[in-house]
Image (cartoon, rainbow, N blue to C red):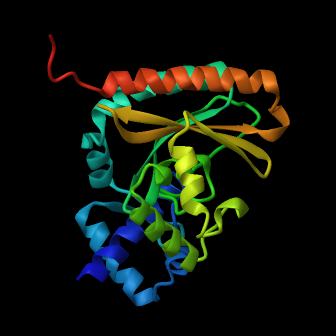
Amino acid sequence: MIKVMDKTFAILEEIVISSPEPLPPLELSRRLRLNRATCSRLLKLLLDSGYILQVSRQKGYVPGPKILTLSNMAAFRKNLLAVARPVIDRCAEALQNSVQIAQLYNGKRYILYYRNCNPRRVIRLDRLSFDDLFFTATGLMLVAHREPGERMELFRRLKAEGKPFFEEFKNGKTIQKKLDSICGSEFFECRKGIQWIYAFPVFENGVFTATLGVSIPFSEYNDSYRRKIVKLMKEASREISLGVSTLHSIG
């Protein structure tokens, strides 16, 4: 039963990710490595339930009215996003680059919201969640604020699955010390190929809850711009942290 649910939700996720373009059934079965009979049966189940719509036999499927309604009704981390969205929008516009907020759930990185204001960059997220915890600044910040035991569980699992790692975070003997350093810092930054990336922690009532991230083309990196990013995003981190925190006593 669990495996059937996993496959069904995997199909739904792929169709949502591909929207607004329809996803053909053959491409769907190829991506998920499902045999055509199983794929067809689960597609019919989702179709009959209103979660997807069939554009045509050749073109495939798009999200249906039920999934769109559920999306509009959902209020995941409503308070956090209500506070964070305008701050992220303001920062992205000020930096003319990409700013995001992410959280860690079930060992995966979820981008709750992002805004890109760099007209020279086209960013399209092709997944709902990411296994790149040791290959992104926000991923490392999320892992760094976990307990040592959970850090190592994530490290070993992602290593065994062959997920990407920054070279300096591949050594299990030194990983805890490096993560401790990130956890104790106000922000983390590093180069990632043609990007320079940043992560800034967000706290709710003193407890780490999320991370802000910034991505800029490495060609735009310089000391003056770096100082602007760090100053602006530290202030943004404090503003969001204050906005989501609640005083339970006064006087």
Work out which quarter of the rendered image holds the N terminus and state it.
bottom left
> Residue at (45%, 23%) from the top-left corner?
238
In the image, is 107 to the left or to the right of 215? left
Count the numbered circles shown: 0
Q: Position of residue 120 (x, y in %)?
A: 77, 34
Q: Where is residue 48 in the image (x, y as percent from the top left)?
A: 25, 69
In the image, is 43 to the left or to the right of 229? left
In the image, is 68 to the left or to the right of 118? left
Up-down: is 231 above or below 193? Answer: above
> Residue at (48%, 54%) from the top-left corner?
143
Q: Position of residue 181 (x, y in %)?
A: 57, 46
Up-down: is 218 above or below 248? Answer: below
Can I make out residue 24 in this image? Answer: no
> Front-most of 207 and 134?
207
> Front-most of 112 and 245?
245
> Front-most of 244 and 92?
244
Work out which quarter of the rendered image holds the C terminus and state it.
top left
> Residue at (30%, 60%) from the top-left corner?
51
- Looking at this rendering, what residue extends furthest in the top direction? 251
Q: Position of residue 22 (x, y in %)?
A: 51, 60
Can I make out residue 170 in this image? Answer: yes
Up-down: is 60 above or below 222? Answer: below
For residue 203, which quarter of the picture?
top left
> Residue at (38%, 40%) from the top-left corner?
208
> Front-most of 1 and 109?
109
